Each structure stands twice: as structure tokens, then as C-alpha cells.
Image: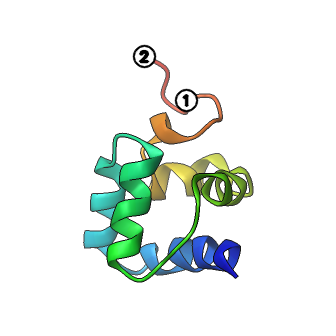
Amino acid sequence: MTQNNAAQLFKAVRQDQALQQRLKAATNPEAFITIAKERGFDFTVEELETEISKLSEEELAAIVNPGIAPRTHIYPR
């Protein structure tokens, strides 16, 4: 059930610009999850990573700070 919460968060964030900006500002997965929990979404770092792995690079960049994902940075420094 919590895996579904991570997927639902990604759907909600596409429609909520303020939430999207807060999540993009998160500097680590734990901060991302804390913000999500404030909105009623409960999931673990592992569940977050699983859902992130399902996103395209464009979807990922629109939702999260690329530096928190276990994947290669979208915008390398």
C-alpha cells in the first residue's frame, strides 16, 4: 500500500506547483519523504527509489531534484 502512496504523490505533484517546488528543493531522500508525509503520503526511501526508477528522465526532472535519485544526475556538474 505504501508503494502506491509514492506513485500517488508523483501524480499529485504534477498538478500542484507549490508541492513540486518544495520537493525539488529537497536535498536528500529523507527530506523528500518528510515533505510527502506532511501531505499524507507515507512510504520508505526504498519505495521512493522504486518509483523514481519507473520515471523517464523528463518526468524525474519535473518532480524531484536529480541529485536525490540513485540514478545518474540528469544535469551533471
| Rendered residue at 58%/60% (across/down) | 44
Compare residues 55 and 39 and report the one nearer the observer: 39
**Where, quadrant-wise, is the N terminus in this rendering?**
bottom right
**Residue 2 percent coordinates (x, y):** 64, 76
| Rendered residue at 46%/74% (across/down) | 14
Residue 43 lies, with reference to residue 71, above or below; the image says: below
Q: Residues within 10 Å of mark 2 (few under 14, many from 20)?
A: few
Mark 1 residue element: loop
| Rendered residue at 44%/60% (across/down) | 33
| Rendered residue at 56%/41% (across/down) | 69
**Residue 53 percent coordinates (x, y):** 72, 50
Q: Residues within 10 Å of mark 1 (few under 14, many from 20)?
A: some
Q: Which residue is mark 1?
A: 73
Residue 5, by quadrant, is bottom right
Residue type at numbered disc 1: His
Q: Say if mark 1 contacts mark 2, CB within 8 Å.
A: yes
**Residue 15 percent coordinates (x, y):** 41, 81
Q: Which residue is mark 2?
A: 77
**Where, quadrant-wise, is the C terminus in this rendering?**
top left
